[in-house]
Amino acid sequence: MKNILVFGDSNSWGYTDEDQGNRYNNRWPIILSKKLNNLGITSYVHEDCLPGRTTNISDPIDGDHFNGASVFKASLLAHSPIDLILVMLGTNDLKKRFNRKPIDVAIGLKELIKISKSTNSGKGSWHDENKSKLIVITPPTLSIKCRDKNWINYDDWIDAYEKSKKLQSVFKKICLSENVEIIDSNNYVKTSELDPIHWSKESHHKFGKGISKAILEIIKF
């Protein structure tokens, strides 16, 4: 049995561009697990995903618990032993109220990487000093609807569209310097034109299948 932890935000939690925030039962982590099992890789995908979660910044409006870095180590240990950690965060850091540049988001990601590297969440017993394999997934570029002043959430996401297009390049530099594998989600999914932050149900299916292939190209279970 291979244990995988998905540490993410609303797009991994199962928030879609429809259903008014009800959690989608066939979200991409579920599809990933099914795909791996169909390939003969017995796996269990643990989901620690929270809508609104950032990389490492507390939300002055919604609360400190949205700070990913503040709970990441506890999550790793709680779900251990973990063979593979998949981190996909950064979208919420682009909210106007945080006033973050893409490089600031990348620095937030670096903190998560450091936590992963210093946490014994890998295979073995509680006392074994093994680390889990980490793969970073860059969140997809937001859709251009972010720039539509008639969109209900426009004020919260001013300039986010332009910043989101730069995340892959700054994330890649951080991952290269930290010797961590990275997957560009833009190769497998596009953000909805109806909701520029979230995905369609069809996109969840495509991403779950695509990401399974991308993972298997990087590691051999």
Image (cartoon, helix red, strand yellow):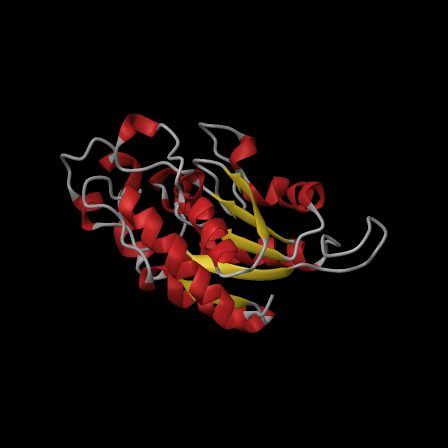
Number of marks in picture:
0
Q: Residue 80: image x %, image y %?
A: 70, 47
Q: Determine the residue positioned at 34% across, 28% down.
A: 21
The answer to whether 26 is drawn above or below residue 176 in the figure is: above
Q: Horizontal placement of 104 versus 196: left or right? A: right
Say above or below: 198 vs 180.
above
Quadrant in the rendering for residue 75: top right
Residue 111 vs residue 39: left or right? right
Extreme residue toward the right, this view: 127
Position of residue 133 measured from the top left corner of the image (x, y, whole percent) = 63, 62
Closer to us: 20 or 29:
29
User: In terms of depth relative to the viewer, which is nearer, 42 or 84?
Assistant: 42
Q: Quadrant of residue 139?
A: bottom left
Front in this rendered view, residue 188 or 117: 188
- Taking the spot 39% from the left edge, 40% from the top edge, the residue there is 26
Residue drawn at (19%, 40%) of the image: 194
In the image, 194: left or right of 109?
A: left
Res 139 visible: no
Residue under the image location 23 percent in, 46 percent down: 192
User: Where in the figure is residue 212, as x and y percent of width and height?
Assistant: 45, 60
Residue 52 position, x and y percent, is 43, 36
Residue 154 visible in rendering: yes
Q: Work out which quarter of the rendered image holds the C terminus and state it.
A: bottom right
